[in-house]
């Protein structure tokens, strides 16, 4: 009887301990608000105090997932007691008004399935301001701004202006994984992007408050049409990191990552026409501040020799957008089509440099030939008036050669645009050779010649060579492992090319390295950037049969990219991280299934 009672007590203790141990596991859903406007965002956190596997979120069928899942992990010790908290966070946008139920989420912990309770959410009409404290998405929107700064909103036709796109970020906010989602097209402008070498973080004011900012893009525009022209907006996809209000075991702030799409907004440019008053008849559309020159390579030469006449415009303005004046010459001068050259650089001040047309001229007869003066007109932006520059007259003196015959000898040097008749003379064609040295050519029969036997035997000699080449190719194609290795090495070089260019620039190098690693995973695993976290990467790569050493190497590189934002890094460390990345990508690509 006592033995039976003892057995009953043991069974009760085991059941009590089992129930007690289960009661220690917590898995629950928490929402930022249960009532919100249709224009607001809802944050839902699934929290557990013990690590689990096979997390299954609800369907969120009445909401659009605009962010997440973001994973955060916290371990802490207080008074000898360990506290563990793991959280999966989602950001939701309601699809319509009404009452909706977010169903249960499930997770497996220690072989048991745990579920959250359903939560009912009420969605009302749009509100002016969020009820209660703003959620993470609202905080992100208030702390990051994309701005298009236009140098001039009412330029003249063909007057240069610049658009500088700046990304402003508040001091307590971070940004990662940004990419251009939609690039502006400048349909009614001549445009050129200015190369930006590295993203330098600067300090500035946005609406009177201190912000950090980077210049993402610089573009020079020249309007080609008058009236109101619209500049399309630049659109970016970014991941915004905002403080979560929690700290890790080292006391550092835990950041919440929120995906956002931001835009600079469209801008309107009111382009003024050039004034009609005082416009020269030879005006070709040049706008700016220019110099004009007409020069020749020589002023004296003999007939059939050549010289070059150059028409050149230099200065600042729309140099690539107008035609140069044409050269006019006497008909007895043979003139070839001009060679056009441009030496123009474009920066935020616009186009600067020089353009030229170089004509090659060959005189046929002896005499003096004047080149008429050439005029060049342009619109001066400083005085807002038209200006004209006229070149000096140039005389070409042909010293030796055949003489052209005309009725009046005195008119030979004065007439420039009339055709001249040639006076017969015994030495007119003295410069043309009329004799030659001929040699006889004896043709040999092709049959049985060296060429004949070479062409006959060459196909037979090529057959064994082709067989050898084909066998080598088949052997190479059959080498599956070798081909996989070569393909993996090429893939590593492809993804890391941008990072290699930025070696030595710490911030830019690690940003491009992290972006390369993410792009590789997106391509191989078909997941979005917003889904990236170390736990998920570990699980996905392990599922694809990648060895633990390669997975650990990949994650350690990601951690180095994050650590580089806060610590000084040497050139040697950057080179080591680059080499390790190339080796790891190649290794993963060989193993992934």
Image: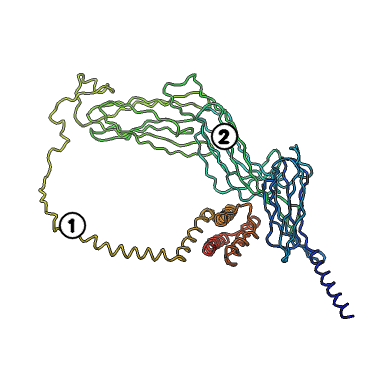
Position of 19 with respect to 269 (left or right) is: right
Q: CA distance from mark 1 to mark 2?
A: 69 Å
* Mark drawn on residue 451: 1
Residue placed at 20% from the left, 58% from the top? 455
Residue placed at 51% from the left, 28% from the top? 225
Position of 282 with respect to 550 (left or right) is: left
Looking at the image, which residue sits at the far front?
1
Where does the image place residue 378, in percent across and percent down from the top left?
46, 26
Q: Is residue 361 above or below residue 240?
A: above
Residue placed at 54% from the left, 45% from the top? 196
Q: Is residue 383 above or below residue 61?
A: above
Where does the image place residue 374, in percent across and percent down from the top left?
37, 26
Q: Quadrant of the N terminus?
A: bottom right
Q: Nearer the viewer, residue 243 or 419?
A: 243
| Mark 1, secondary structure of its residue | helix
Quadrant hosting residue 39: top right
Where does the image place residue 50, in percent across and percent down from the top left?
74, 63
- Please name the residue that numbered disc 2 is placed on: 231
Q: Nearer the viewer, residue 423 or 444?
A: 444
Q: Is residue 143 above or below residue 282?
A: below
1 or 2: tag closer to the N-terminus: 2
Q: Quadrant of the C terminus?
A: bottom right
Marks 1 and 2: CB-CB under 8 Å? no
Q: Nearer the viewer, residue 526 or 585?
A: 526
Residue neighbourhood size for the residue with mark 1, other residues' Cα within 10 Å, grouped as few (<14), some (14–19), many (≥20): few
Position of 485 with respect to 51 (left or right) is: left
| Mark 2, secondary structure of its residue | strand
Its colouring scheme is rainbow
Quadrant hosting residue 472: bottom left
């Amino acid at each position: 009887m006592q033995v039976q009672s003892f057995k009953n007590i043991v069974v009760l203790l085991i059941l009590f301990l089992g129930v007690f141990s289960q009661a220690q596991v917590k898995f629950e859903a928490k929402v930022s608000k249960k009532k919100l406007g249709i224009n607001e965002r809802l944050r839902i956190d699934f929290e557990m105090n013990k690590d689990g596997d096979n997390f299954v979120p609800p369907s969120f069928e009445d909401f659009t997932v605009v962010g997440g899942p973001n994973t955060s992990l916290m371990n802490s010790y207080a008074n000898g007691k360990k506290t563990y908290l793991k959280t999966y966070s989602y950001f939701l946008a309601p699809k319509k008004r009404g009452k909706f139920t977010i169903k249960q989420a499930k997770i497996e912990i220690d072989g048991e399935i745990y579920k959250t309770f359903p939560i009912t959410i009420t969605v009302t009409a749009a509100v002016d301001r969020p009820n209660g404290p703003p959620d993470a998405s609202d905080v992100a929107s208030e702390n990051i701004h994309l701005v298009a700064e236009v140098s001039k909103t009412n330029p003249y036709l063909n007057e240069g202006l610049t658009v500088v796109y700046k990304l402003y970020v508040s001091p307590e906010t971070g940004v990662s994984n940004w990419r251009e989602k939609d690039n502006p097209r400048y349909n009614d402008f001549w445009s050129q992007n200015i190369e930006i070498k590295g993203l330098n973080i600067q300090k500035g004011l946005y609406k009177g408050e201190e912000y950090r900012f980077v210049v993402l893009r610089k573009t020079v525009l020249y309007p080609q049409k008058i009236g109101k022209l619209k500049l399309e907006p630049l659109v970016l996809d970014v991941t915004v990191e905002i403080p979560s209000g929690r700290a890790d075991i080292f006391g550092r702030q835990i950041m919440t990552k929120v995906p956002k799409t931001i835009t600079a907004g469209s801008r309107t440019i009111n382009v003024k026409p050039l004034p009609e008053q005082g416009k020269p008849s030879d005006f070709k559309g040049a706008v700016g501040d220019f110099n004009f020159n007409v020069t020749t390579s020589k002023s004296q030469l003999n007939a059939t020799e050549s010289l070059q006449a150059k028409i050149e415009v230099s200065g600042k303005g729309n140099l690539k957008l107008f035609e140069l004046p044409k050269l006019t010459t006497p008909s007895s001068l043979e003139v070839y089509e001009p060679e056009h050259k441009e030496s123009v650089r474009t920066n935020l001040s616009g186009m600067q440099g020089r353009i030229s047309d170089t004509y090659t001229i060959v005189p046929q007869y002896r005499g003096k030939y004047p080149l008429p003066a050439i005029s060049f007109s342009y619109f001066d932006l400083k005085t807002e008036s038209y200006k004209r520059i006229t070149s000096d007259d140039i005389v070409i003196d042909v010293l030796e050669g055949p003489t052209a015959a005309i009725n009046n000898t005195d008119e030979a040097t004065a007439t420039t645009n009339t055709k001249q008749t040639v006076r017969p003379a015994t030495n007119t064609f003295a410069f043309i050779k009329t004799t030659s040295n001929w040699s006889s050519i004896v043709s040999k029969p092709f049959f049985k010649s060296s060429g004949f036997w070479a062409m006959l035997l060459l196909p037979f000699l090529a057959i064994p060579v082709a067989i050898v080449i084909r066998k080598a190719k088949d052997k190479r194609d059959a080498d599956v492992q070798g081909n996989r290795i070569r393909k993996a090495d090429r893939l590593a070089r492809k993804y890391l090319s941008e990072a290699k260019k930025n070696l030595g620039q710490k911030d830019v190098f690690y940003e491009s390295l992290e972006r390369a690693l993410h792009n590789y995973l997106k391509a191989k695993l078909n997941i979005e950037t917003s889904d990236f976290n170390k736990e998920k990467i570990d699980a996905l790569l392990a599922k694809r049969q990648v060895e633990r050493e390669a997975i650990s190497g990949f994650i350690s590189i990601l951690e180095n990219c994050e650590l580089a934002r806060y610590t000084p890094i040497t050139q040697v460390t950057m080179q080591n991280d680059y080499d390790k990345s190339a080796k790891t990508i190649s290794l993963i690509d060989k193993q992934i299934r």
